[in-house]
Amino acid sequence: MSTPPKVCVLRAPGTNCDIETAHAFDLCGAESTRIHLLKLLENPSQLNEYQILCLPGGFSYGDDVGAGVIFASHLQGQLAEVIGNFLAADKLVLGICNGFQVLLKAGILPGGAADWPPKPDQDRNATLTWNTNGKYTSLWVNLGVLAPQNVFLKDIDQIELPIAHAEGRIAVSDDSIITDWQANQQIAMCYREAGDTETTLQQEILPYPINPNGSAYNIAALSDPSGRVLGLMPHPERFLFATQHPQWTRLGLEGEGAGMQLFRNAVNYFE
Ligand SMILES: NC(=O)CC[C@H](N)C(=O)O
């Protein structure tokens, strides 16, 4: 058997999903370590020991200034070099919810290695901002996968997962970026109606609760062009066991939850 990949689950003050996220990777055979951002800042080169970097969900720095903004500024300001090496290597990066916000605010997404580090005057063409309902929203959503070449999404066509966020709406500065993302297969997952068998990218914003936050083009997740970076608003680490689904008895669900596959895909990449 090959050596298990090492996962760095990077937490900051206010992160609250690091334990279950590390557990998800470990259940799939990885060896994860939860590392505090302030510890990594003391010795940034320790990141080189890991094959997977995961930014988990939560409220880093209390969502002050904007969700993910302060965490992102540390990545840009003090960790630019090690992050650059990580992105350039054949390694994986996953950002879940607050982690996705961090990846986007830092500029790790949407461009990945090619655009890192972002230039100070670089225009931002996409962000995650307040849900259109103005509220912290917590519910289960149906998602269709549009970027099966992303390592984390291999063999997943559709998935039901919970969301829990206030700033989960993808906003784009102009629609031409959508064309670029499509060309690079970067639109990873979209919200869609339960029972839909196909996922189509559409400009019409699906109504709440299908699209829970009003995201442009109903986008829920983005990939970098290489398919080795994924940022997603839903929480796969909250559906590791069938019994975590609100209707598991009615639906007769047993065993593993569908979220496990994302973590397994990442671990299997290093076999
Ligand atoms: N679950 C999360 O990671 C929440 C992210 C962020 N605090 C928000 O509310 O938007």
Image: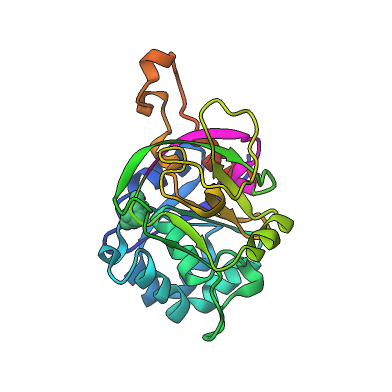
Residue 40 coordinates in the image, percent (x, y): 39, 70
User: Residue at left 66%, top 47%?
Assistant: 147
The quadrant where residue 198 appears:
top right
Residue 108 coordinates in the image, percent (x, y): 54, 67
Q: Quadrant of ligand 1?
A: bottom left
- Left/right placement of residue 169 relative to residue 113 reads left
The quadrant the N terminus occupies is top right
Residue 254 located within the stretch drawn in magenta: no
User: Residue at left 61%, top 41%?
Assistant: 145
- From the viewer's side, name the closer residue of 2 and 10: 10
The quadrant the C terminus occupies is top right
Residue 253 coordinates in the image, percent (x, y): 44, 18
Asked whether the viewer can see residue 9, the reply is no
- Left/right placement of residue 210 relative to residue 115 reads left
**Residue that protrudes farthest toward the bottom in the picture:** 121
**Residue that protrudes farthest toward the front in the picture:** 204
- From the viewer's side, name the closer residue of 127 and 173: 173
Q: How is the image coloured?
A: rainbow
- From the viewer's side, name the closer residue of 229 and 141: 141
Asked whether the viewer can see residue 31, the reply is yes
User: Residue at left 53%, top 71%?
Assistant: 107
Residue 146 versus residue 245 in the image, above or below:
below
Tell me where the magenta segment starts and ends, as one range: 151-163
Residue 19 versus residue 128 in the image, above or below:
above
The quadrant where residue 84 appears:
bottom right
